[in-house]
Image (tube, grey):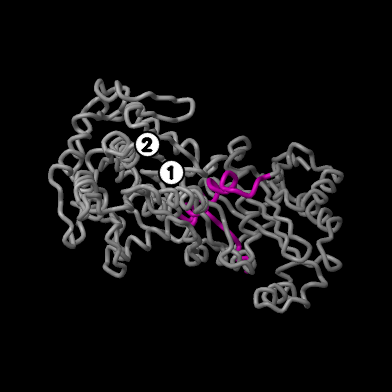
Amino acid sequence: MRLSILDDKGYELDEAAASNAVEFFSDMLIHVKGRQANQPFVLLPWQADIVRELFGRKRADGTRRYRKVYIECPRKNGKSLFAAGLALYILLCDGEQGAEVYSAASTRDQASLVYSMAAQMLRKSPILSKHVTIRDSVKRINHPKSASFYRAIAADSAAAHGFNAHGIIFDELHTMPDRELWDVLDTSTGARTQPLTIAITTAGHDRSTICWEMHQYAEAVRDGHIDDDGFLPVIFSAGPDDDWRDESVWERVNPSLGVSVTWDYLREQAARAEENPAFENTFRRLHLNQWTQQESRIISMASWDDCEHEVDWSGYDGRSCFAGLDLASTMDVTAFVLAFPEDDGGMTVRPWFWIPEDNISKKARADQRLVRNFGERGDVETTPGNEVDVIYLAERIMEICQNYDVRYMGYDPWNAAGVVQLLQSHGMPLHAIQKMSQGSSTYNEPFKRLLSWLGNGKFRHDGNVVLRWMAGNTSHREDVNGNIRPDKGRSADKIDGICAMLMACGLLINYGSEHGAYMEAGSGVVLF
């Protein structure tokens, strides 16, 4: 796919300037990573189109037409190396005295990535290396002849003011935590004759970010809804109705396919997405460049209902299992879930829920009326008073555990210290109780395993109406690496039972093999 350039609107293309910029890459720079390492950096057609338009299209006064460029394309299409080459061209060939060129990123490691590629290319160039000094300790390259420099800077940099930027490269803009660094650098270009800000990124999922703002602006310019002659939008992405499994879509939106990203790699990733529904959004965002919702319902209730079984719980007496505890704040639902490993590699879960007795009749919101109905039917147990009764709760948990071989219990440390101390005083050994942080490090693997089990029938439950309600409330948050954790779709939604279940599932995954997939009733040694 070639870049579709906007109507030139009377701006002339300086063929010499355009060709010089393209030839700078192939004549002066070489690849420093991967299969093409040590070969000349010959721009791919899509990259050459951008470079020609960017550095060749001129205004009447001879300066560049474009002041901002937004390039959005899927992962592994060579964006960072391209960004490093652009930074070097702006530093060395733009004719700007005292130029300040910055590559910016959300973290020091990401900012260092572009800088390191630029420094390596300079060191491998017999011609360019004579004209620069490289200071790796401060991530800075100086060009003494023009009194210019290139520097890498991160969003967490202690000093990000006082700049006079001529060129700015934002790498992976979708990871920028806020717009502060963007605004600081962007407003620092006012004194320059032809400043240039280039954002190169993959699509994200957080629609409160500067990247989403720029994405929307780029689409509006591209589609003619905003008239901005100084803005160049370049977006390679699948459409909302495109089938993410269609290989012709992959080819259309991955401009470096067959070079820096391979067919085999994309097929492997697509197969993973087919197997694990939680990875589908990750595949679409990273490899088809589609913006996905930050929060979206992720559990198929049809699959959940298909996993309901009539369970004779007396047959589970003495069975090896793992527990998760999500303790409520003063007035909400507390959840305790046991996860039993099964011979087929899946699990069966049994939940219990509690809410303070005095609060059942006081809450008027729809979700609380539902909890009240649960309590009146006995689906949610009540504890005395108007807040969580930790003494009653600890005794009740110990009573439940007497029937099973509970190997480990994971708990959310928030507000749980009192209950944990009481459980220990009742005989629960310290090593069996594990504090589990409420982030993707705890939830990613069990959440993805659950979604896989929902698809293949290896997850089993007895139809508990409260747990089903919470499953329907469960959204998810996804980080930039594709790790997921459960999240509420709305602040009023309750998902405590799902969190407790996933903690138990995580312990089952980590420790289940130590005790065998299944233990016959009465064969286990009860730890507490």
Q: Which residue is mark 2?
A: 98
User: Which residue corresponds to the image point at 65% horizontal and 78% vertical from the top-left?
Assistant: 366
- Answer whether residue 299 is visible to the viewer in this image: no
- Circle 2 Cα neighbour tier, 10 Å, few/some/many (<14 / 14–19 / ≥20): some
Say which quarter of the image contains residue 232: bottom left
User: Which residue corresponds to the image point at 47% horizontal and 43% vertical from the top-left?
Assistant: 163
Query: Residue 285: percent from the left, percent from the top?
Result: 38, 53
Residue projecting furthest to the left:
15
The image shows residue 267, relative to residue 150, as above or below, that is: below
- Amino acid carrying label 2: it is Gly
Decide: marks 2, 1 in contact (CB < 8 A)? Answer: yes
- Answer whether residue 46 is visible to the viewer in this image: yes
- Secondary structure at numbered mark 1: loop
The span shown in magenta is 436-465
Q: Is residue 241 left or right of residue 107?
A: left
Of the pair 258 and 267, the residue shown nearer to us: 258
